[in-house]
Amino acid sequence: MEQHRDIPRSGTGGKHLVIDSRDGAVILHVRVQPRASRDEIAGVMDGALKVRLQAPALEDRANTTLCEYLAELLKTPKSAVRILDGERSRNKRIEIRGIQEHQIRGLLAREA
């Protein structure tokens, strides 16, 4: 059964992170900014989690770094994080197995 939640980020003026839950996984949209000065969660942008990565968008490096970074932040195996859509785009749909929505909220709380 799929559940859909809008998670407000404090101080965003109504911007919400859209998260779906199904079959023991969380699915969310991520907006990636490659070649940033550091890897970081940068808030919410149009319903997506904005993530800045140092890795360039060459030879799949940014995608690999994104999955590794999210796995590290969420303390889950790298194999639990996968890109469902948007491998060649800055806008991606990510599935993370074995976590709950409140763990995603924790990423935003850490960033605030």
Image: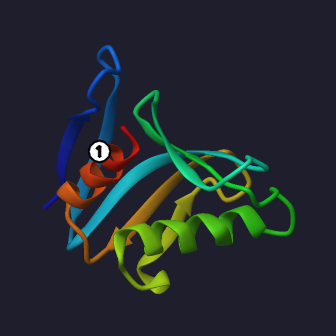
Instruction: Identify the residue shown where x is 59% and y is 64%.
Output: 66
Q: Is residue 105 above or below residue 99?
A: above
Residue 9 appears at what percent x and percent y?
Answer: 29, 32
Amino acid residing under circle 1: Ala
Instruction: Identify the residue shown where x is 77% and y is 68%.
Output: 60
Instruction: Identify the residue shown where x is 62% and y is 53%.
Output: 86
Q: State the quadrant of the N terminus.
A: bottom left
Quarter of the rendering containing residue 22? bottom left
Q: Is residue 112 above or below residue 70?
A: above
Specify whether 27 is left or right of 61.
Answer: left
Helix, strand or loop for disc 1:
helix
Q: How many marks?
A: 1
Tell me the crowding category of disc 1: few under 14, some 14 to 19, or many 20 or more residues within 10 angstroms, Cα based.
few
Q: Is residue 52 above or below residue 80?
A: above
Residue 72 appears at what percent x and percent y?
Answer: 46, 74
Specify whether 89 is left or right of 30.
Answer: right
In the image as oriented, which residue stretches furthest toward the right? 58
Q: Which residue is mark 1?
A: 109
Q: Is residue 97 above or below residue 54?
A: below
In the image as oriented, which residue stretches furthest toward the top? 13
Instruction: Identify the residue shown where x is 65% and y is 69%.
Output: 65
Q: State the quadrant of the C terminus.
A: top left
Residue 25 appears at what percent x and percent y?
Answer: 27, 69
Quarter of the rendering containing residue 11? top left
Specify whether 94 is left or right of 20.
Answer: right
Color scheme of the displayed model: rainbow
